[in-house]
Amino acid sequence: MPDYENLLYAFDGDAVATLTFNRPEKLNALNAATLAAVGRAFDDIASDDAIRVVILTGAGEKAFIAGADIDQIAEMSAVAGRDWGRLGQSLYSRISAFEKPVVAAINGYALGGGLELAMACHIRVASERARLGQPEIKLGVVPGWGGTQRLPRIVGRGRALEMLLSGDPVDADEAHRIGLVNHVVAPEQLMPKAREIASRIIKNSPAAAALILQAVDRGLEMPLDAALAWEASQFGLSCATEDMKEGVRAFLEKREPRFTGS
């Protein structure tokens, strides 16, 4: 089983890999070593065809990720701060563009870099105890790992600006109301709900899932006409896959499909 610093890896053969941020004494705050470990883990997952869905969560009951490690940014210069921002942005953009679905299971505080990571995931499930926010302004800094860009795209400009400028977190119910999370469940149901979502995804075509993720990720950054043309090209690519042939055969034969991702 792979060994990643500050990160627990679990894979039980059900096509779902779980990565657990494991610095509970620091509320799973992110430092450079943890970011590097996440990058290595996603490299390994990308090359493992047995893994179809990734779930991210945090160790302990208090936090998903309470933000970046303040000790690492306290004395940063402008240049070091820019480079730190680019480091986190690069990793989070990779997760956002990952060709296997990534589900965030938010078990507690998701603040600063923790919320930015959750927003880079494709689907978000929150415990009733979760608190989500971008409190960087209270430290006199700007969110640097995508918060000023992904939050408005998810919840809208006005709601995002209120969260960014006040620095105040929202509870799980409010996060659900504004579309920041997909589901809110009791704490003991958080991982079962994340796995239930994963189980529904892995019944479908891995090839089509990758193309859908590409269509959405890139299409959202394009004008509508260009995005529709991009979607059509993705549809065309899906028509050339073995998964498409198997899906059609299974439908006509009234049986469950056996997708291979090819």
Image (cartoon, helix red, strand yellow):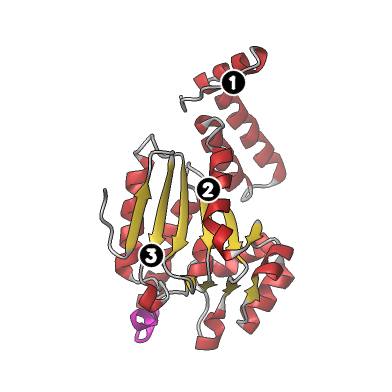
Highlighted range, magenta: 69-79
3 or 2: mark nearer the eye: 2
Specify the quadrant of the image occupied by residue 151: bottom right
Give how far apart the Cα atoms at labels 3 and 1 are. Answer: 40 Å
The image position of residue 74, as x and y in percent, is 37, 86
**Residues at circles 2 and 1 in contact by the CB criterion of under 8 Å:** no
Specify the quadrant of the image occupied by residue 51: top left
Q: Amino acid at mark 2?
A: Arg
When the figure is inspected, residue 49 is found, relative to residue 254, above or below; the finding is below
Q: Which mark is residue 195?
A: 2
Residue at the disc numbered 3: 87
When the figure is inspected, residue 245 is found, relative to residue 131, above or below; the finding is above
Name the secondary structure under disc 3.
helix
Q: Amino acid at mark 1?
A: Gly
Instruction: Tell me, yes or no, whether the highlighted magenta stretch contains residue 72.
Output: yes
Residue at coordinates 62% horizontally, 36% vertically from top-left?
A: 230
Lower sequence index among marks 2 and 1: 2
**Residues at circles 3 and 2 in contact by the CB criterion of under 8 Å:** no
Residue at the disc numbered 1: 247
Specify the quadrant of the image occupied by residue 239: top right
In the image: residue 37, left or right of residue 252: left
The image position of residue 229, as x and y in percent, is 66, 34
Q: Nearer the viewer, residue 192 or 88?
A: 192
3 or 1: mark nearer the eye: 1
Q: Is residue 119 visible?
A: no
2 or 1: mark nearer the eye: 2
